[in-house]
Image: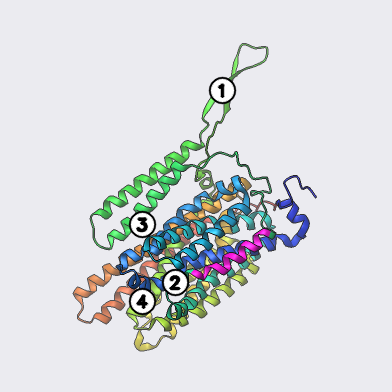
Amino acid sequence: MDLAQGPHSLQALQARYGERHRWLLLLSVMLGSMAAVMSSTIMNVAIPDMSTHFTLGQSRVQWVTSGFMVAMTVSMLTTPWLLSRYGYRRVYEVCMWLLLGGGVLGGLANDFPLVMAARVAEGLAAGVVQPIPAIIILRAFASEEQGRASGLFGVGVVLAPAIGPSIGGVLVDVFGWRSIFFMVVPLAMLALWLSRRYVPTSAPGGVQADADSPGLDWIGLALASASTLALLNGLVQLRGDDTVAVALLVLAGLGMVVFVAWQRHLLKPRRSVRTASSGRKAKSLRQVPRVRRGPLMNLQVFGHRHFAMGALVSFTYGIALFGSTYLLPVYMQMGLGLSPSYIGAALLPAGILLAVTIAAVGRLSHRMPPAHWVSWGLGLLALSFALMPLVHPAAGLALLWILVILGRIGLGFILPSLNLGALRGLPKDLIPQASSVIGFVRMLGGAAGVSICAIVLEWRLAVYALASSNPASADLRAFNETFVFLATMTALALLAAWKMGEAPAPPKKD
């Protein structure tokens, strides 16, 4: 056993635990991802109580969720740099300590700024952690095992948001909003214990972490953060018909253009050095790259068509997933007049069925190319949205539950296949970058999707409120048209999914 990199390097752990190490490693990072996903979704049930406790308006207390989303979206881009500089274990453990500390601080805080600080800390940790499992699956598992590993990971990550809100609703009723923060603590502690046993100190590829690697692209990080904040704030301002929204959206667009230009600049060699050929007067030109920092987003990943199309699908998928997650409960409560407790109980079986579908698709993924699974899933998801206008309270709710289940089955087709279809066949050194980029665009689409759905819904509600004398009928028509909008967005993603096509042969495992 080669212990040149220490007893906790990837090589040492593989020698100690054998073939089962990759599954134990996946289990360890899965628990951390479950803690991150749970902390991102479960807080919604506590917002009304927090608004009352801190005597804040709905728009201000909503930043408990929005601040988390912005921090998580931007911090995803730092994962490749952190892993290469500090290694899997140190990065993962710091993230778990941030989640744990954020949970304790938020649960004990008596001031809203402290609650916000706790949520931002949790968001930063959640963003860094989320690309790690995809990197591990693509590097540690053989191609015939990657679908099964993705399915197992997807089950755990989906169960957290499926079960979390139901448990969270009970905790809020019994113990108050503070208990929501403490839910993440046991998972983070268990993840920390497992990381000491199975997560290597090595960087991706089994190489030793290099503390002298190029520095972090702070300029790129600042540009990405500012552009994301301007975009999300601009979309929120559109809901109030504020002219500031136009200025914010223009700034977001300009910021993204400058960000791309800066990333392209960092990929260029810094200077050329002329060296004389031995015994000749002629001189040859030799390029010597002097890169003090690497780009935050390596744009070379978009040169691979299957990845570029996968990223486009991921963005649209984020809009549909997060937009529908916001829209469905509001529709059931405002449009159909169902109680919140009934909605939570009714959506739980669909969430569990989603987890079962992910596991099944993961085991069967080798029978079809990932692009085909993604296309079937998008088709089912679009169909479930498109048929929502057929639901009517007078006809019963059976069709509603069928459509919700149909949509969740579609999601189960997509989740284990999208990353595999986008990342397979990429050069190994680009996999960490590609994983963080595809996570970034998915979360950016998700954060934008909630605001876009809210804008479309409020627009149609305002239109029908003026034209209809029946408020209930007007609300239903507005919701139905918003679902048709989501169906259209999801169907458009089918074009990109088909263009993912057959990815090149996957790289062999490390």
**Residue designated by label 2:** 178
Task: Name the residue nearer the viewer: 423 or 23.
Answer: 23
For the residues labelled 2 and 4, the Cα–Cα distance comes to 28 Å
Q: Which residues are magenta?
A: 182-196
How dense is the environment of label 3, judged by Cα within 10 Å: few (below 14), some, or many (20 and up)?
many
Mark closer to the observer (2, 4): 2
**Residue designated by label 1:** 273
For the residues labelled 3 and 1, the Cα–Cα distance comes to 45 Å
Q: Is residue 304 above or below residue 149?
A: above
Q: In the image, 144: left or right of 400?
A: right
Mark closer to the observer (1, 2): 2
Which residue type does callout 2 highlight?
Answer: Arg
**Residue designated by label 3:** 232
Residue at point 38%, 49% (across, down)? 226
Mark closer to the observer (2, 3): 2
For label 2, the SS is helix
Q: Is residue 128 visible in the rendered structure shown here? A: yes
Q: In the image, 352: left or right of 198?
A: left
Q: Is residue 485 above or below residue 303?
A: below
Residue at point 62%, 66% (across, down)? 190
Q: Position of residue 8 (x, y in %)?
A: 71, 53
Task: Name the residue nearer the viewer: 426 or 68.
Answer: 68
Among numbered discs 2 and 4, the one appearing first in the sequence: 2
**Residue designated by label 4:** 331
Among numbered discs 1 and 2, the one appearing first in the sequence: 2
For label 3, the SS is helix
Q: Is residue 309 visible in the rendered structure shown here? A: no
Among numbered discs 4 and 3, the one appearing first in the sequence: 3
Count of numbered marks: 4
Quarter holding residue 70: bottom left
